[in-house]
Image (cartoon, helix red, strand yellow):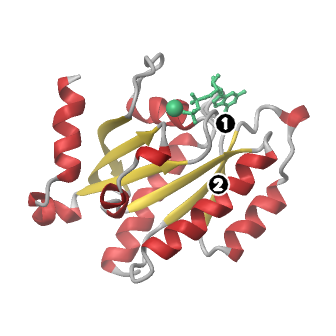
């Protein structure tokens, strides 16, 4: 609990501006049940996390392309309770849907539109994540649809299975690369 509180303060603090290059804040959004907590759990190395109300945050230092970066990942469970100010603080967003649930895919589009409005002036990485690819027979949203949606909304796209740990590492490494690209340009 204490760890969470400290991280939450860190998320809200403005004193990190100097660390900006090393500390990246990532916010997960998406309908309930799509697998946000499962994805974060794998990232954080937690196999069985208890559900606790509100927002949970996890911090981990990743080495991507030979360079260390600290990601603070915020897992929300009630988006309505999110303060706009907190949403604004993110360096990147993961919009998660379940490939087995079309309504969650539609919610993802709505979230993308809301984010665009909220952060009109900023060029912030957004990654569309289609989770639960292991549930092949209940798939309701095709890869092509996911990809087309990402193109239309100008964001990156990846499909994952939290269950099989498939593409989860790639997802978080991809986030780091996207943030670096925006901050430093393609040659930085
Ligand atoms: P959240 O509400 O978005 O945080 O979703 P959770 O991470 O709590 O997951 C909701 C349910 O979906 C849980 O029962 C998970 O075990 C299950 N789940 C999450 N990811 C996957 C996945 O990739 N494949 C399958 N089959 N189930 C998943
Ligand atoms: Mg959750």
Q: Residue at position x 68%, y 67% from top?
A: 150
Cβ of disc 1 within 8 Å of ligand 1?
yes
Would you place residue 13 above or below residue 148 in this image?
above
Q: Can residue 45 be seen in this view?
A: yes
**Is residue 61 toward the left or the right of residue 107 in the image?**
left
**Is residue 33 toward the left or the right of residue 26 in the image?**
right
Mark 2, other Cα within 10 Å: few <14 / some 14–19 / many ≥20: some
Q: Which quarter of the image is occupied by the N terminus?
A: top left
Mark 1, other Cα within 10 Å: few <14 / some 14–19 / many ≥20: many
Task: In the displayed orientation, state which residue is furthest to the front.
Answer: 80
Q: Quadrant of residue 99?
A: top right
Task: In the displayed orientation, state which residue is furthest to the right.
Answer: 137
Element class at badge 2:
strand
Q: Position of residue 133 (x, y in %)?
A: 75, 39
Residue at numbered disc 2: 158
Q: Where is residue 28 in the image (x, y as percent from the top left)?
A: 48, 48
**Is residue 102 toward the left or the right of residue 151 in the image?**
right
Ligand 1 positioned in quadrant: top right
Q: Position of residue 112 (x, y in %)?
A: 59, 65
Q: Residue at position x 46%, y 36% from top?
A: 40
Residue at numbered disc 1: 161
Between residue 53 and residue 67, name the one nearer to us: 53
Would you place residue 23 above or below residue 47 in this image?
below
Label 2 and label 1: CA atoms lie apart by 10 Å
């Amino acid at each position: 609990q204490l760890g969470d509180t400290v991280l939450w303060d860190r998320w809200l603090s403005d004193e990190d501006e100097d660390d900006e290059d090393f500390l990246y804040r990532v916010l997960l959004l998406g309908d309930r049940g799509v697998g946000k907590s499962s994805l974060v759990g794998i990232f954080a190395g937690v196999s069985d996390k208890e559900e606790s109300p509100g927002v949970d945050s996890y911090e981990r230092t990743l080495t991507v392309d030979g360079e260390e970066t600290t990601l603070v990942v915020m897992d929300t469970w009630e988006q309505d309770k999110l303060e706009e100010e907190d949403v604004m603080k993110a360096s990147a967003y993961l919009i998660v849907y379940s490939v087995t649930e079309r309504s969650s895919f539609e919610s993802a589009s709505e979230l993308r539109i809301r984010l665009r409005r909220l952060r009109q002036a900023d060029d912030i990485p957004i990654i569309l994540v289609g989770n639960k690819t292991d549930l092949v027979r209940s798939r309701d949203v095709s890869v092509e649809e996911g990809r087309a949606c990402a193109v239309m909304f100008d964001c990156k796209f990846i499909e994952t299975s939290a269950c099989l740990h498939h593409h989860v590492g790639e997802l978080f490494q991809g986030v780091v690369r996207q943030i670096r690209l925006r901050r430093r340009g393609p040659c930085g």
